[in-house]
Every structure is written in C-alpha cells, then in structure tokens.
C-alpha cells in the first residue's frame, strides 16, 4: 500500500497521467538519449548515478528527465549523476543538453551535473548571423523548467562563427523557468553564464559565479539579456558573484531598450576594467545589494558577508531581511518556529537578498564553492573532476580547480601540467601525492607569450585535458 501511495505522489508531483512510464537508465536503457527516444509525453526518465558521456536532445518530448535527487532530495545525487558533453559525435552540436522543439512547462531537467559541453553552431533566429551557443544547455522555442542542477565547466570557443555566447545556458524565444541551480566556471565571449535572447521567464534562486566572458556585445558574464519577449522576465533572489570579463559588464548586461525586473539579488565582486555590476537603461532594479551602488528602491551597497561554503550569508549580513517586504516574497517559515525563516534563509520572514531567500529558498547542493588556493575543503568528492580554468581567456593569472575522490590507498599521485600548442611541457603545477578533496591552483603565465595552451590532470585512474587561452 505504501509503495502504491509513493508512486501516486511521484506522478502527482510531476503532473503525470496514469499511462505514464518511468524509464530507468541504465537498467532498461543504456543511455539517456535512448530512454528519451523511447519516451512518450508525460513519462519520466530516471537516471542512476554515474557519468554519461552524451550530448542529449529532448526531441520535442514533454517529459521529466531527473536523477534520483527527486526521490529523497539527497544532494549527492546531483554531484554524482553527470552529463558530460565533451565527446560529441558531431562537433558542431556539442551542447550537453538541447531543448529546442516546442517542449512546454511539463518538460523538466533536474538533478544533474552538466559539464564539458562545447556549444552548438546555431543560426540566430533574428538574422544576426551564425553563433556557437549553449555550452551546457541550449533552449529555443520551448518553455522548460530547469532546476537543481550544477552547470559547470562548459565553454563556447570561437571558430568559423560570428561569436560565442551562453557558456552555461543559451535561452532564446521562449519562457523558461530556471530555479535553484549552481552555474559556475563556464566561458564564452558574451553571456558566459546565461544568455537570454528574446526570452522571458523566471530566473530565481540560482548561484551564478566565476563565469568568464570575453569582450563581445558588452560581455554580461552572469546574465546577457537582449530584446523583449511577449511575456516578462524576472531575475529574482540570485547570488551573482565573482564573474569576470575582459571588457564590458561582468554582472548583468541588458541591451538598450531591454526590459526586466531585477529584484532581491546580490550582485557583488564581478570584475572587468570598468567593474560595472549592472547595465541596462530599462532594467528595473529593486531591493538588490549591488557593489558600488545602483539607483532603485530598496537597493543597498554593503559587504554581503558570505560564509566559506556555497555563498550562504551570515546572520550579521546586511542582506538579511532586506529584500522586498511584500509578503509574497517572504522566506519560508521554520516549522518549529514560524516567526523565523527556515534554513538556509536567515533572520525573520522578510525576504533575504540572494539565492537563499524568498519562497524558493532551498539548499541547492552540498558541494563546496568557496575554495582556497591549493587546499582541500568541503565534502570528499566521489569522482575525479577537472574544471574549466577561470578566467579564460586570462592575463596573466588564471585558476584551475579539480577534485580527487576517495582512494583505497588514501591518496593518489597526481600531476597537473601545462603544455603549449605543440605539446611541449611549459609548466608543472603539481607532481605529488594528494589526499581526497577539492583543490584550486593558480597558474601565473607571466613568463609565457600569448597563445593557446593546454592543461592536463593525470593520475593512475584518470586523465583529462582542457584548453586555456593567454591574451596579453
């Protein structure tokens, strides 16, 4: 009886009908794409932990694609269920996930780490030219829900196209809902984190950090927004920090005449030569903490006082209880003390600025995102992982992050080396035994000339190489 009740609750939560199926990967279908291909509208594709080297396409299927995260809200399933798009069958179609065939709001992507994507060559729908976009996720003409994912280490590189955008996500000509995601360490020449091109939608409670843009179209390394849509766009209760651009706006960039509601966000420490956090003459910015200040009701300019993990704010932060005071934006109440906010929100019930305030306040993942140089922090990871360096391109210092999982011997001999375009080793950052954990190393290329280089992480059980670009 309890099992029947559980199945009914799952079907109700996702709006499934009685004829819907749960299609299991890999026990029934070896790949995620084969499960999608076999699905009918209303089905759920349930993916077990593991790394799936695929570039998947929803192909118009109005389905739920999820890891086991949805069954128990166990955040470790987000970390350990990985869609890695770094080995595409067709290099011109290298996005990890494509949703571009009129999928609606019953289409859900949730509970994955999405990494290694290189974007898809895409003819702009409005005649602007040929672009490579959507390193992690490409959405067009569709209205999906994308929630509780880690979208990291994706990139869109220039070559045979006008420019590149949406290193993390490219969303166009649609109304998308983007909730409770971590979007980090993605690269592109504009919109390194998220591109919104003629797109409405709700973009709420995301942590968007360390995405690096270049210099095209005003950069907009966290959010790049162009033109309006028939329905509004709302960017609300996000934490937008430490994104970078060679020029232009490293935070939120809205082209002239582009409208949007920017409410209850923290926009801090995003860097470029101008260090402009937000630009856009028709963006309505209210109740945000914006470094260096921004005109608008309720806006403040104060150190957010993040703690050391996941950009939670401390109890003493000026962002606590300083979001919009309207009741509809309140933080959820603590069930045991209804007058105070439920963790990870702080203080009373009034909205906290940033990703952990508001009605969608939630722990997003249990990964550690505040990482010290050359040191181990946070939970011990389950897999090797090499992140995309940031910023990229860089001059002359960049950061390289990676993880070492638990080993039977307790440690692994690891090397991290830099090579030039001819394969000659030019620097060794690490050549030593490392214990399991998360690491970040700085690479100073002051002695090298401009050009394309490669960095390679290698152990007995793992080797991965990625590209970095030095521009002096």
Image: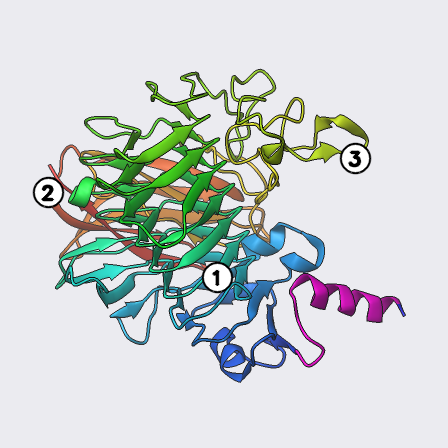
What is the number of the mark on residue 194? none
Q: Is residue 333 left or right of residue 363?
A: right
Q: Considering the numbered disc 1 on the image, is that residue within a helix, a strand or a loop?
A: loop
User: Magenta-highlighted stretch: main secondary structure?
Assistant: helix
Q: Is residue 400 visible?
A: yes
Q: Residue at x 23, y 65 (%)?
A: 125
* The quadrant where residue 391 appears: top left
Number of numbered markers: 3
| Residue range (magenta) | 2-20
Q: Is residue 211 visible?
A: no
Q: Position of residue 51 (x, y in %)?
A: 50, 64
What residue would you read off at disc 3? 335
What is the number of the mark on residue 144? 1
Q: Residue at x 45, y 73 (%)?
A: 58
Question: Callout 1: 10 Å neighbours few (<14), some, many (20+)?
Answer: many
What residue would you read off at disc 2? 450
């Amino acid at each position: 009886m309890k099992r029947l009740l559980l199945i009914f609750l799952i079907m109700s939560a996702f709006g499934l009908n009685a004829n819907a199926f749960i299609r299991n990967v890999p026990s029934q279908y070896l790949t995620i794409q084969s499960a999608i291909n076999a699905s009918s509208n209303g089905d759920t594709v349930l993916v077990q932990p593991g790394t799936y080297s695929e570039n998947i396409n929803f192909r118009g299927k109005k389905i739920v694609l999820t890891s086991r995260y949805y069954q128990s809200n166990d955040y470790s399933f987000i970390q350990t269920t990985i869609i890695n798009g770094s080995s595409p069958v067709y290099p011109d179609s290298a996005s990890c996930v494509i949703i571009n065939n009129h999928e609606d709001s019953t289409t859900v992507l949730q509970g994955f780490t999405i990494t290694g994507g290189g974007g898809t060559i895409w003819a702009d729908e409005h005649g602007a030219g040929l672009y490579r976009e959507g390193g992690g996720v490409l959405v067009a003409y569709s209205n999906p829900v994308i929630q509780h994912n880690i979208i990291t280490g994706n990139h869109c590189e220039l070559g045979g196209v006008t420019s590149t955008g949406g290193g993390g996500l490219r969303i166009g000509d649609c109304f998308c809902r983007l909730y409770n995601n971590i979007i980090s360490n993605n690269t592109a020449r504009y919109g390194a984190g998220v591109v919104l091109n003629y797109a409405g939608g709700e973009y709420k409670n995301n942590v968007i950090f360390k995405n690096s843009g270049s210099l095209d179209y005003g950069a907009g390394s966290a959010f790049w927004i162009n033109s309006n849509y028939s329905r509004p766009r709302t960017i609300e209760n996000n934490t937008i920090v430490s994104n970078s651009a060679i020029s232009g706006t490293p935070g939120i960039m809205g082209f002239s005449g582009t409208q949007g509601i920017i409410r209850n966000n923290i926009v801090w420490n995003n860097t470029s030569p101008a260090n402009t956090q937000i630009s856009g003459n028709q963006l309505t910015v209210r109740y945000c903490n914006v470094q260096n200040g921004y005109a608008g009701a309720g806006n403040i300019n104060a150190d957010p006082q993040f703690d050391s993990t996941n950009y939670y704010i401390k109890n003493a932060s000026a962002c606590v209880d300083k979001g919009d005071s309207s009741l509809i934006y309140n933080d959820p109440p603590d069930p045991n003390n209804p007058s105070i906010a439920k963790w990870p929100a702080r203080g009373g019930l009034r909205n906290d600025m940033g990703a952990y305030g508001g009605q969608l306040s939630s722990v997003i993942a249990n990964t550690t995102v505040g990482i010290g140089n050359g040191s181990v922090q946070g939970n011990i990871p389950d897999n090797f992982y090499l992140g995309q360096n940031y910023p990229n391109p860089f001059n002359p210092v960049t950061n390289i992050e990676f993880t070492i999982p638990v080993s039977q011997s307790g440690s692994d001999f690891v090397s991290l080396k830099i090579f030039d375009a001819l394969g000659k080793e030019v620097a060794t950052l690490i050549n030593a035994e490392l214990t399991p954990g998360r690491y970040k190393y700085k690479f100073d290329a002051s002695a090298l000339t401009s050009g394309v280089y490669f960095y390679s992480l290698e152990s007995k059980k793992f080797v991965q190489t990625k590209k970095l670009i030095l521009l002096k």
